[in-house]
Image (cartoon, rainbow, N blue to C red):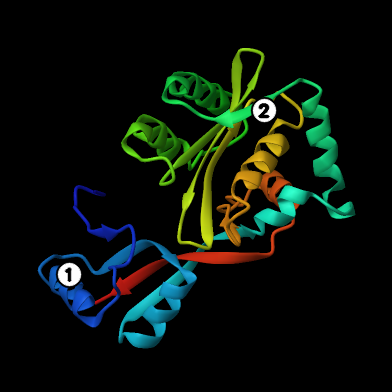
Amino acid sequence: MRDSKERIDLVLPPCPLSGSAFQAIEGILQDSSQEFLRILWVDKEDASLLQSEFDLRLTLHLKDREYLYDPKLISRLQGKGYRDVRKKINFTKRLNPKFRRMKMSDVSSARSLHERWRNLQGRSRDFLVDWGYTKAALSNLHIFNEGDIDAWCVEIGRDLVAFALTGPIDEKTACFFVAKTDIQINGLSEYLRWNVYRQLSNYMVVNDAGDLGISGLEQFKRKFRPIGFNNTYTAQLGR
C-alpha cells in the first residue's frame, strides 16, 4: 500500500506461464485503478518466455546475478585459483572447528548468532535483504523434512559460530540460500562454505544467490570460482 492506495504485485510469475493466466491478470487490472502490475522476481528463462510468447507491454529490469558453482571443484580446492581459500580454511582449522548437521536444539543458538551478525553488519550496510527470510527459515525449520531443507553448523568449543541452509532445486541443481558466520573469526566463512559444498558434491550445479551489489561480497564469492551466472529480473506489465 502506498499513498493510501492498495496495489497488486506478484512475487513470481504464474506457474505454469500461460496466456489464460495473463488474461486473468489483465482482468484484475481492469477492475482496479492500477495501471501496471509488477512481478518482483523473474528468472532468465521466464523473462525470455514473457518477451517471446505473450503480447504484453513488458519492461524488464535486472535485479541480481546469481552465482553458479560446480560443487565438486570447490570440494577439491585444487590449483592456484583456490590458494587464498585453502589458506583461510587452514587458519580456521587451527581452532578445531566441528562441522555437522544442525539439530532443532541448535536453532536458538543460530538465532542469537544471526542477531549478532545483523548488529555487526548493520553498522556498515544500509539494508540487509536476507534478514527476514533467514529469520523465517530458522523459525520454520521444524516444518521441513531433511532433504527438503538441510541445515549445517560449525561449533568451536561449545559455541555455535556459523550455520548454513541448503535445498534441492531439481535432481541436478541445489540452492545454497543462507550462510551466516561470526565475522570476527578469520577464515570461518570459507571453512563453512567449503564444508557445505562437500555435502552438495552429488549435484552438478549449486545456485549460491547474488552479491547484492556489495563489492566485498562479490570479491568473496569470486574466490570460489563461479562457473556461470543466472540473471534475475523484475518485470512491469502495463495495461
What residue is disc 2 on?
Answer: 183
Residue positioned most to the front:
202
Q: CA distance from mark 2 to mark 1?
A: 46 Å
Between 210 and 72, the one nearer to me in the picture: 72
Q: Earlier in the sequence, mark 2 or mark 1?
A: 1
- Three-letter code for the amino acid on which mark 2 is drawn: Ile
Crowd band around label 1 with a 10 angstrom C-alpha radius: few (<14), some (14–19), many (20+): some
Which tag is nearer the camera, tag 2 or tag 1? 2
Q: Residue at x 89, y 53 (%)?
A: 80
Going by the image, does 196 lie left or right of 165?
A: right
Q: Amino acid at mark 1?
A: Leu
Which numbered tag is attached to residue 90? none
* Tag 2 secondary structure: loop
Is the C terminus in the top left, top right, bottom left or bottom right quadrant?
bottom left
Checking the image for residue 29, the label placed there is 1
User: Which residue sits at x=34%, y=64%?
Assistant: 39
Coordinates of residue 178 in the picture (x, y in percent): 52, 41
Is residue 122 among the parts visible in the rendering?
A: no
Q: Secondary structure at mark 1?
A: helix
Taking the spot 10% from the left edge, 68% from the top edge, the residue there is 31
Q: Is residue 122 above or below residue 49?
A: above
